[in-house]
Amino acid sequence: MVALYGGLAVVWSLTGGWIGREARSGIALHWAQLPVNPLLLHGVRFATLTATALILAGLPILLVAGSSLVGGAEGDALRLVSGLPGMMLLYLVFAVLVWALGGWGVAGDGWAALLVATMLSVLELVARLHPEWLGPAAGPADVVGLPLDDLGLASAFLAGGGSGGWVALIRVLLWMAGWGVVGAAGVNATSRRRHPPRPR
C-alpha cells in the first residue's frame, strides 16, 4: 500500500498543476512564439513528465524487490515485480485524467483529477451494482465511469494471472484514449482562444 500510494503521489506531484495553470495564464503566450503546434508541444511535454513520473514511481519497488531477492525472499520479490505493471496502468489512468482536465484550463488539475476519479468510481459502482437507479443512463454511465472491474482484470492479466484479461486491458486503454481525446480537444480549444489563427 505504501508503494501504491507513494507512487501515486509521485505521479500527482509531477503531472498535476502545470498544464491547467499554463492554459489559464500568460505563460502560454511564450510557448505560442514557437513554430510548433500547441497540442503537439503540450502533448510531448506531458508524455515526458508522465514517463519520468512512472520511472520514479517504479524505481523504489524494483529496489525493494532486488533487496528481497538478495535476502532470499524470492516469493516477495516476484510478487512486487509482477504487480508493477498493474500499478503503472493505474497511474496512467490518473495521469490521463490530469491531462483531460488540465487541457481545459482547470488550474488545480491534480486535485480535480483525484476528485473526478472518485466521482467516476462511484458512478461505475452504481451503474454496475444498481443500474435501476440510473435507468436508461446506466449504459452510458458504465462507459464513462472509471473501469474498476477492467482495471482489476487487466492488472491480474499483466501480472500473469490468466489469458482472458487482454479484453479488459483493451477496454481500459480505450477508456484512457477517450479521456485523452477530451484533453487534446481542450488544449486545442484553449490555444485557439488565446492565439487565433493568423491571417495568411
Image (cartoon, rainbow, N blue to C red):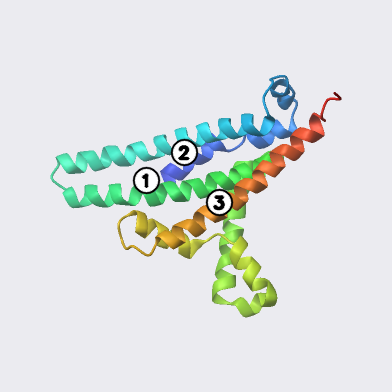
Q: Is residue 49 above or below residue 110?
A: above
Three-letter amino acid code of the residue under disc 3: Met
N-terminal label among 3 and 1: 1
Horizontal and vertical percent for residue 35?
Answer: 69, 21
SS label for mark 1: helix
Residue 123 seen anywhere in this rendered image of the structure: no
Query: Cα distance, mark 2 to mark 3?
Result: 20 Å
24 or 193: nearer the viewer: 193
Instruction: Find residue 3 and name its label.
Output: 1
Three-letter amino acid code of the residue under disc 2: Val
Horizontal and vertical percent for residue 158?
Answer: 35, 54
Tell me what residue is drawn at x 45 percent, y 32 percent.
52
Query: Cα distance, mark 2 to mark 1?
Result: 10 Å
SS label for mark 3: helix
Three-letter amino acid code of the residue under disc 1: Ala
Q: Quadrant of the C terminus?
A: top right
Instruction: Find residue 10 and name its label.
Output: 2
Query: Cα distance, mark 3 to mark 1?
Result: 23 Å
Tell me what residue is drawn at x 80 percent, y 31 percent.
194
7 left or right of 112 in image = left
Q: What residue sits right under mark 3 in the picture?
A: 176
> Dot 2: within a 10 Å radius of its alpha carbon, few (fewer than 14), some, or many (20 or more) residues?
many
Picture mark count: 3
94 left or right of 191 in image = left
Q: Which dot, 2 or 3, sits closer to the camera?
A: 3
Q: Which dot, 3 or 1, sits closer to the camera?
A: 3
Tell me what residue is drawn at x 40 percent, y 35 percent.
55
> Dot 3: within a 10 Å radius of its alpha carbon, few (fewer than 14), some, or many (20 or more) residues?
many
Q: Is residue 73 above or below residue 197?
A: below
117 left or right of 104 in image = left
Q: Is residue 79 above or below residue 122?
A: above
